Image (spheres, helix red, strand yellow):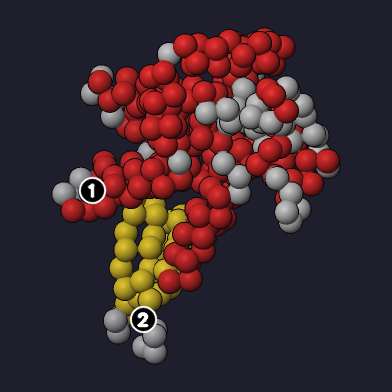
Amino acid sequence: MHLYPIKILLGILIISLLSLNCMYGQNRDSSVFYGNEKLVTPEKVWIIKALCQDETRLWTSPFKKPDSRLIYWAPVLGATIVSLCYDEKIYSRIKSFQLKHEWVSTVSPVVTYGGENVTLISTCALFYFGGLIFRDNKARQTGLLSAEALLHAGIIVEVGKMITGRQRPSFDQGKDHWNWFPASLNGYKKNHPGSKYDAFPSGHTIAAWSVATVIAKRYKDQKLIPVICYALATGVGLSRITEDTHWLSDVIIGGALGYSIGNFVVRERSNTKFTLFPVTDGKSLVLSATMQF
């Protein structure tokens, strides 16, 4: 997963901003015209500003006062470090198992599709529009939160890939190699096989886990749903190894980051409300989308 997550998601966001007056509800006095009546609305902050604020909080969270997060990140970092030391051997053994069991090669391409942009964006849309059709506010909100988590996942994973420039196991006969920044920028040059050096972390895994976590957290009262969500996300991660695109450590850190992003969005934005309505100044008419939390 190269720059496609950011291109698609930001493309959708930009189009929305051009066609809609997209805002997050906050506390600044502002006025709009609705029909012939002047309405005083709550303070509004542009959606990009709100998303940037969330992105900043995600990046700065590791530097804040340590708390219970250490219980989560200590074993994750430990497993990642161990995996980094034995990634080549682990990959070799997984491939040996795959060669002996034909079903792995049959199932892998299907499971890995769960981490594709089209699958995850469609999932977000399904929840949102399904919520609209059936008047289910919980489902509609879940779609919005999943989309935000997916956007944050796309940004974070691209920064990680750009910094590390790790070689995928499908190249050089499964040998591990890193092209650290700024050498990693060569992957963005024209006619350069950029996808060869963007293994760390796994984009499919972080994306799948971010959306799966939002859905699992939102529907945790139904015990089967979290199990299904996390199982599918885990399957996506493992399939990235059998598809020769990632090492185990890429998958471990990708899953951990995806879970953290999804958990953050649910925790911080669970009270978000979305409203769409027409606004006019007497000369032109636009659709205004407000999100209040």
- SS of the residue at dot 1? helix
What x and y, as percent, mark residue 1?
Answer: 57, 41
What x and y, as percent, mark residue 159?
Answer: 68, 41
Q: Is residue 293 above or below residue 11?
A: above
The three-letter code of the residue at mark 2 reads Leu
Specify whether 202 is left or right of 267.
right
Most distant residue in the right direction = 182
- SS of the residue at dot 2? strand
Q: Residue at x 39, y 52 (%)?
A: 292
Specify whether 197 is left or right of 18.
right
Q: Nearer the viewer, residue 234 or 130?
A: 234
Residue 285's label in the rendered image is 2
Q: Residue at x 51, y 35 (%)?
A: 204
Q: Nearer the viewer, residue 234 or 13?
A: 234
Marks 1 and 2 sit apart, C-alpha to C-alpha, by: 26 Å
For marks 1 and 2 on the same chain, the one whose residue lies earlier in the sequence = 1
Q: Residue at x 70, y 45 (%)?
A: 193
What x and y, as percent, mark residue 259?
Answer: 49, 27
What x and y, as percent, mark residue 75?
Answer: 59, 10
State the image quarter where residue 36 is shown.
bottom left
Q: Is residue 187 above or below residue 10?
A: above
Q: Is residue 69 above or below residue 22?
A: above
| Disc 1 target residue | 131
Q: Nearer the viewer, residue 203 or 266?
A: 203
State the image quarter where residue 171 is shown.
top right
**Badge 1 density bin: few <14, some 14–19, many ≥20, Cα 10 Å:** some
Most distant residue in the left direction = 134
The three-letter code of the residue at mark 1 reads Gly
Which mark is in front, 1 or 2? 1
